[in-house]
Image (cartoon, helix red, strand yellow):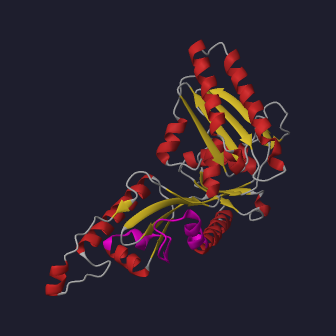
Amino acid sequence: MHQPLTPAVLADLRRPRKYPAVSVLLPTHRREPDNAQDAVRLRNLLEEAKEAVHDDPEVSRADRIDVIGQLDQALGEVDLVHAEDGLAIFAAPGEHQVWSLGRSVPARVLLAQTFLTRNLVAAHAANQPYWVLALDSEIATLWSGGRQHMPEAADEGPFPVRRPEVDFDPERQEQIGDTPSTFSDEETRRFLREVTEAAGTVLAADPRPLYVVGETEALSALDDAGPVVREAVARIAQGGLAQGPGRALGDAVRTADRERDERQLTDVLTDLDRARSRKAFAGGVDEVWSSVSEGRASLVAIEDGYRVTVRDNGEHLVPASSDERGARDDIVDEIAEQALDSGARVHFVPDGSLTGSGNIAAVLRY
C-alpha cells in the first residue's frame, strides 16, 4: 500500500499493542523470474508466524484465534503482482496492516509489544516523498509521490478543494458587461485562499517538498492568495492535470524533481566535506552507529543500495554473516530510524557517492 507515512501514521504504528504484535517481513521482487517464489516464501513465513503465536504460552486462546485470523486476512490483501522490493505485514489483536516497500528487507518474523517499523521508516525516507498540488479554476487536488512510485491522489483531510458553483446572471452581464477573468472574481479568490489554507494544514502535519502544477494564470492567482506557490520547490505551468492521472503528474514534475535531487546531493556532500574539515565527521557503519546512538548526528547520508550485516562485539560493530548469533542484517535501517528519532536529517544518495566514507557518513553536532 502507499498510504502516506505521516508523523501521525508512524506514531500509531509504533505505539505499544496488546501482546502479540506480530511483524512479518519479506524481501520481494518486481520482475520474473525472481518473483516466482515470493508467494511460497510469504506463505512459509506466515505459517512460521502462526506457529509462533500458537505455541506462545503468553497468548490467550482468544487472542491466538484473533491474530491468526488477522494474518489470514492480511495474506488476502497482499498484491504480489505489483510487488516492490519488500513487504511488511503487521498483525495484533483486532487489527492488521500490509505495507509494500520500495526497499529490500530481511526475511523475519517477530512477536513483541510493538511492530518492527525500522524497515518501513527507512524505505519511506529512501523514497524521498513529495506532494503535488494540482489545480484549475474548479478544483485543487493533492497527490502523494516519491522516488519509488507515481503520484497518487491523497483524498484525505481537506482535499480535494472544489470551487463553489457560481450563479450565471446573463442580464447583469448584458447591463454592465462584467465578465470576470477566470481567476480574478471574488469567488475564485476565496477558493484559492481555501486551497492555500488546506495545503498549509497538510504541510504542517507532514512536511515534504511541494510541487505546484497548473496554468500560468492559476499559479499567479494562487501566489496572490498566500505563500504556497512562493514556498514550493517548483511551479510547473501545465494545465489540465488537476484530475490527474498520477502518471501524467509524475511526468510533469520529473525534471524538477531530478533537479531537486541533484541540488540535495550537492548540499549533502558539501556538508560532509565541511564536517570533515572541522573534525565533526563520522564515516563507516561503526562510527555512524555510535554517533547516532549517542544523539550526536545532525545529518546522516546513506547510499541507496548499501546493506551490511554486523554483530556487536561489545565495543564495535564488526562484519558478520546472517547465521551468526547476534547478527543484525538491517543495521542500516536501524541507523536511519534512530537518526530520524533523534531529529537528524537522513538522506539516501546514489550508490558510489560515499565510496571514500564507507558508503555511510554523518555530520556531528559536537
Image height check: is 158 above or below 14? below
Q: Residue furthest left?
A: 175
Image height check: is 100 above or below 267? above
- What is the magenta range? 225-254
Image height check: is 274 above or below 86? below
20 and 243: which one is in front? 243
The x, y position of residue 288, in whole percent, is 69, 50
Q: Is residue 203 visible?
A: yes
29 and 270: which one is in front? 29
Number of on-image labels: 0
331 and 289: which one is in front? 331
Residue at 66% x, 35% y: name it. Answer: 75
Could you say which quadrant of the image residue 330 lies in? top right
The x, y position of residue 214, in whole percent, is 45, 74
Give the side of residue 99 with respect to residue 137, left or right: right
Could you say which quadrant of the image residue 76 lies in? top right
The x, y position of residue 193, in whole percent, is 30, 67
Image height check: is 135 above or below 81? below
The x, y position of residue 146, in whole percent, is 59, 60
Residue at 51% x, 33% y: name it. Answer: 15
Give the side of residue 200 with respect to residue 79, left or right: left
Quarter holding the C terminus? bottom right
Q: Is residue 251 magenta?
A: yes
Give the side of residue 169 with respect to residue 320, left or right: left
Residue at 65% x, 46% y: name it. Answer: 100
Q: Is residue 199 magenta?
A: no
Give the side of residue 273 with respect to residue 37, left or right: left
292 and 252: which one is in front? 252
Q: Is residue 20 visible?
A: no
